[in-house]
């Protein structure tokens, strides 16, 4: 039996044939579990950087944001998406799956503890790194939000190129017609790669998302810095708390509020071209930029209450 066939989730899907709503919940659960692993990788890189102090420091804003993202995604769950019998849970955990909210909490505690321990090595340096990175990201976000929407992505704007129209022109110029034309069109649309365009369009929203998640995480980290008692991590730490309090979250929140009308302008322009590729049914409900109302249905979506 292959490794995939041994995977408990693969076996469960084969035996239960979940509906689309359940599949979406499962995907959300898995995405929430992966995010802390990215944060831990950045913490490891920052630990190495503290030793050598060469080159640019790792992205601590992104590190905290991955933590914050999982926190926000967990708001979507009261119970796990799959009711696994208790006797089977160990085999699922051995395969790398979180089975309960407590499993997430344990992993997130490791991320928060690691972040605060690293910050404790030099609190002012940590704060300085974060503040510089925040300024850089806010400057970039502001520049992206002010770009002219009427330009295509290659000209620094947000007007989608019509891949289907371009492909039809190419096939017509090549003399393809009849059923061959239709078959080639279907194949071309399936294989067409507009990822470069999508990456450009997504950048301001991904950055907005990261900063939102960072703010959520930082609020937690500040509390943990003075409330947790862990001698190994040197907590509680007034020095770490004081350093983290120097990060101007009020200004960050204000900046995000000020930038949102510009981002809505971009989204409205994309929507006017029936471009909804930045939507995501697995994103937290508060991320309005991932749940833009479409004029034409694109498939079933799970209804969720907003946490705003």
Image: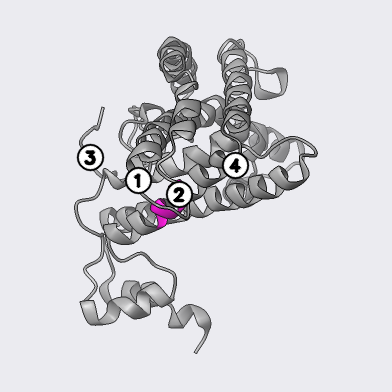
Measure the alpha-carbon separation of dots 1 and 2: 9 Å
Measure the alpha-carbon separation of dots 4 and 2: 13 Å
Do the numbered discs 4 and 2 sit on residues whose CB atoms are within 8 Å?
no
Going 50% across and 27% down the picture, which residue do you hit? 243
Residue stretch rendered in magenta on the structure: 107-113
Residue 196 in picture, x, y percent from top left? 66, 36
Measure the alpha-carbon separation of dots 3 and 1: 33 Å
Name the residue carrying label 3.
Answer: 304
Q: Disc 4 or disc 2, which is closer to the eye?
A: 4
Going 60% across and 17% down the picture, which residue do you hit? 144
Name the residue carrying label 1.
Answer: 228
Q: Quadrant of residue 223?
A: top left
Do the numbered discs 1 and 4 sit on residues whose CB atoms are within 8 Å?
no
Magenta span: helix, strand or loop, mainly?
helix
The mark that comes first in sequence, 1 or 4, is 4
The mark that comes first in sequence, 2 or 3, is 2
**The C terminus appears in which quarter of the rendering?**
top left
Measure the alpha-carbon separation of dots 1 and 4: 17 Å
Given residues 164 and 131, the one toward you in this image is 131
Q: Disc 3 or disc 4, which is closer to the eye?
A: 4
Residue 222 in picture, x, y percent from top left? 40, 33
Residue 242 in picture, x, y percent from top left? 46, 26
Q: Disc 3 or disc 1, which is closer to the eye?
A: 1
Q: Disc 2 or disc 3, which is closer to the eye?
A: 2
Measure the alpha-carbon separation of dots 3 and 4: 42 Å
Q: Tell whether position 108 is magenta.
A: yes
Q: Confirm whether residue 119 shows in the render.
A: yes
Q: Is residue 5 left or right of residue 199?
A: left
State the mark number for residue 113.
Answer: 2
Q: Residues within 10 Å of mark 4 (few under 14, many from 20)?
A: some
Do the numbered discs 2 and 3 sit on residues whose CB atoms are within 8 Å?
no
């Amino acid at each position: 039996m292959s490794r995939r066939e041994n995977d408990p989730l693969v076996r469960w899907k084969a035996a239960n044939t979940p509906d689309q709503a359940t599949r979406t919940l499962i995907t959300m659960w898995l995405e929430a579990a992966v995010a802390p692993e990215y944060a831990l990788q950045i913490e490891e890189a920052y630990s190495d950087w503290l030793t050598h102090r060469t080159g640019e420091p790792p992205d601590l804003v992104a590190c905290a944001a991955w933590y914050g993202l999982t926190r926000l995604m967990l708001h979507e769950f009261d119970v796990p998406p799959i009711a696994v019998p208790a006797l089977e849970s160990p085999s699922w955990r051995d395969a790398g799956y979180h089975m309960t909210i407590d499993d997430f909490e344990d992993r997130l505690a490791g991320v928060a503890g690691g972040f605060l321990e690293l910050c404790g090595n030099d609190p002012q340096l940590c704060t300085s790194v974060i503040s510089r990175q925040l300024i850089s990201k806010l400057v970039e976000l502001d520049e992206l939000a002010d770009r002219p929407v009427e330009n295509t992505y290659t000209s620094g704007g947000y007007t989608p190129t019509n891949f289907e129209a371009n492909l039809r022109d190419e096939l017509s110029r090549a003399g393809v017609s009849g059923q061959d034309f239709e078959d080639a069109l279907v194949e071309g649309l399936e294989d067409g790669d507009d990822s470069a365009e999508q990456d450009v369009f997504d950048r301001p929203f991904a950055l907005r998302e990261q900063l939102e998640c960072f703010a959520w995480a930082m609020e937690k980290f500040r509390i943990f810095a003075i409330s947790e008692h862990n001698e190994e991590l040197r907590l509680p730490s007034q020095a770490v708390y004081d350093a983290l309090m120097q990060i101007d979250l009020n200004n960050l929140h204000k900046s995000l509020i000020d930038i949102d009308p510009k981002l809505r302008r971009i989204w409205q322009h994309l929507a006017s071209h029936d471009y909804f590729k930045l939507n995501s049914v697995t994103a937290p409900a508060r991320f309005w930029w991932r749940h833009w109302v479409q004029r034409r249905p694109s498939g079933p979506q799970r209804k969720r209450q907003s946490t705003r």
